[in-house]
Amino acid sequence: MLRGNESVAYAFKLARIDVFPMFPITPSTLVPERISKFIADGELDAEFIPLESEHSAISAAIGASLKGARVGTATASQGLALMHEILFIASGMRLPIVMGIGNRALSAPINIWCDHQDTMAERDAGWLQFYAESNQEGLDLILMAFKISEDKRVLLPSMVGLDAFVLTHTMEPVDVPEQEEIDEFIGKKKPEYLTLDANNPATFGAFGSPSHYMEFKYAQYLAMKNASVVIDEVFSEFTSKFGRKYSKINEEMMDDADIVFITLGSCTGTAREFIKMKRKEGKKIGLLKITVFRPFPKEEIRKALKGKKVVAVIDRNISFGFGGAVYGEVAAAMNGMDESPKIVDFIVGLGGRDITFNTFEEVLSIAEKAMNEEVDEINWIDVDKEAVEKEEII
């Protein structure tokens, strides 16, 4: 029985990380706490580096990775935001750092509970992004992220999101593999290029003029495309070794579905049970869970949604002035398809607000209406609109 944060820490231990730079922040603090205990108890041979900020922690991660170390760290929300500048550097320097994120709302107002605004705000930073539905997925995805990121066809950092408190602090049964199994699965890190070496000086992250900069960005673009193939390979290998099946998207009850709910993270379980209940009432609803958000699984989503009538995108984030980030990606993916379904966005669960059967009842009601008439493109669910409109909340 492990909390989500503990499952992330066990994954780092199993991956035999060499360095763990950190600055604690709710709700991910238990990760560095467990790592420090593993090291103190002699269970993990690694450098634990407490630093003065998250900006410093990710900067130290870059230095360690450049030296050839396998590096893990963890953060959340404002901590991830403070890393923003350096996230682009880690990706641009092609460093396979892996980071566990306790998905938490961004201030203001101050909020320590779950939504996906923090990682969605970094979706263009060049990091692979995975979202866990359960604590088991948290452990498994961290392990696979190392193998994917360190593949010479990729060499990009990864972040794995676990919903704050719903997963990070909640205990669930987790199958923790044996160390020998993970040693065989991941293997030792083999630096593909020059590393920091006082006896062999080299320059990293040097000045890039207009005559060269764009080629570097194109190389990152190709690496992210390559990651899509590598993810499929690693997911397949993981399934064959450990029996747990992973794919970039998971389709459930989709064969005859007219309406499809798209989810990320822990709310998927609630959506699944709601859909099962509604199917007993004769409702033709399907579920599509996105596990990999970067690289975005465009072709898989196009294939899965072909012939469907309405797609209800469940967004636990908001891109102000537009709508949910997942909605925008799905809508773009479906562009140009014949008989594209009607895509409707639902903003739910911000700041840790519960996502319940009642939430999905309202989503379904609007989705059913969308089959025959026009509905609002962006729909806020479970929000006191009247209080805001009366300027009781500004």
Image (cartoon, rainbow, N blue to C red):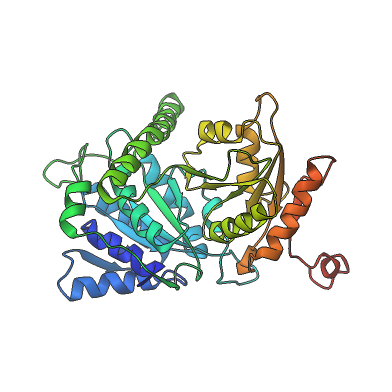
Please provide percent x and percent y for residue 33: 32, 74
Please provide percent x and percent y for residue 107: 61, 66
Q: Residue at the spot x=45%, y=73% of the render?
A: 170
Q: Is residue 285 left or right of residue 47?
A: right
Q: Is residue 347 left or right of residue 84?
A: right
Count of marks placed on residues: 0
Residue 317 in view here: no
Please provide percent x and percent y for residue 303: 55, 31
Tell which of 265 and 198 is nearer to you.
265
Q: Residue furthest left?
A: 199
Q: Residue at the spot x=46%, y=71% of the render?
A: 27
Q: Residue furthest right?
A: 390
Please provide percent x and percent y for residue 184: 17, 48
Q: Is residue 12 left or right of residue 221?
A: left
Residue 342 in view here: yes
Tell which of 197 and 33 is nearer to you.
33
Q: Residue at the spot x=51%, y=34% of the render?
A: 300
Residue 66 drawn above or below residue 362:
above
Residue 314 drawn above or below residue 340:
below
Question: Quick one: quadrant of the C terminus?
Answer: bottom right
Residue 371 drawn above or below residue 51:
above
Q: Residue at the spot x=43%, y=45% of the render?
A: 127
Question: Quick one: quadrant of the N terminus?
Answer: bottom left
